[in-house]
Amino acid sequence: LLVIKEVLKFKAGWATPWICCALGLASGVAIGMITEYYTSADFKPTRTVAEYAVEGEAFVVTKGDAVGSKSVMLPVAIIGVALVIAGSIGGTYGIAIAALGMLSFVGTTVTIDAFGPIADNAGGLAESCHLAPEVRKITDKLDSVGNTTAAIGKGFAIGSAAFATVSLICAYVSNLKGMPDFNPANIQIDSVKIIAGCIIGGALIEFFIAILTDNTIASAKELADVGDRQLSDPDILAGKKDPDYNELVALATKTALKRMLLPSVIALAIPFVCGAFFGPEFVIGILLGATIVAIPRAIFMGNSGGAFDNAKKYIESGAIEGHGKGSAAHKAAVTGDTIGDTRKDVVGVALDIFIKMMSTVATTLFVVITALYSLIQSLF
């Protein structure tokens, strides 16, 4: 009977879930196409970043940031329209099904995501093994394609995170119906607690980005110090002794595991701590503010990083006459690529996980609290 009641609420009847699923698929494809335009060296935005590299590092970073910011508007607009349509015809269930539709591409997105690192490592092996320059040119082209496909995969992940997070927030509010002395119908957008939570939730995303960036640069410095120490050995430079690769690999693994602890704890603890001290309305604000800020920031990080990387590859291909590999323009593009790597491979991929984790914890936590409250009431 409950299922029948829910189906009767669908504006398009039995076809509602299928429409929402198709909507999610179409949104994902559209976001992928937009991402390709802004990150591929075949199109104007990335080529413009490469052309500005001739003027120096500051021009590269400034233009790359502008490209990343421009790339945010259309994907966010698509997500917003899709959320409105799915929510209008299918409610929270429709939004969840739209997320499911987008996630149905997960096999493809994981595959194209993996293509980039494979091509990048192939290029590194070609160079370290002193293969013919033509081999490196082929792997560079493949790596450039891999950067774009990885950005497209991240676009799908961000879009599905937006749908999933909104449905989780709606589920969280619905779960509050079982809480004592709280009526979700009384929630008002002008509530001071919700507004304060939104502001702090947005700031929380920036703090999270800062932690991830600090962790990355600190780990990179540790690895660079070890590499510098090893290369200071005359025997290694002379080729009489091999560097200790295992030391670097072990250090990278150790620092990655150690530095992931704080961001994970923040995502898990924020809903619990805020709910305990300030109440469920404040948690609603936290989730809304974090989601609103995280989605455009994640798109900006992924697309600007992809544009930086492919701008460097574009210069290395010799497309800009007189400014090939080893030139001042190439060095400026390498600076941009170094900045972009942290953005697209660390921050961009972590933000969608962060908002989904907070929403999941908040929803699960209050389900457990409600169940415990009901159990205590039945016992006493």
Image (tube, rainbow, N blue to C red):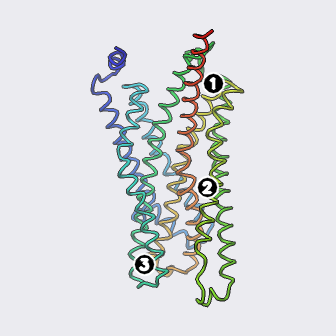
Neighbour class for label 3 at 10 Å: few (<14), some, many (≥20)? some
Q: Is 53 situated left or right of 313 in this image?
A: right
Marks 3 and 2, how far apart in space? 33 Å
**Location of mark 3 (residue):** 136
- Looking at the picture, tell me which residue is in the foreground, 89 or 129: 129
What residue would you read off at disc 2? 257
> In the image, residue 162 lies at what x, y percent?
48, 39
Q: What's under tag 3, amino acid-wise? A: Arg
- Of residue 205 and residue 104, the one placed in the foreground of this image is 104
Which numbered disc, 2 or 1, marks the residue that appears first in the sequence? Answer: 2
10 Å neighbourhood of mark 2: few (<14), some, or many (≥20)?
Answer: few
**Helix, strand or loop for disc 1:** helix
- Residue 103, compared with residue 333, is above or below; it is above
* Image spot of residue 279 (x, y percent): 67, 24
Image quarter hosting the N terminus: top left
Q: Secondary structure at mark 3?
A: helix
Q: Which residue is mark 1?
A: 280
Q: Amino acid at mark 2?
A: Leu
Amino acid at circle 1 = Pro
Q: Is residue 70 left or right of residue 199?
A: left
> How far separated are the C-alphas under marks 3 and 1?
56 Å
Residue located at (27% from left, 27% from top): 15
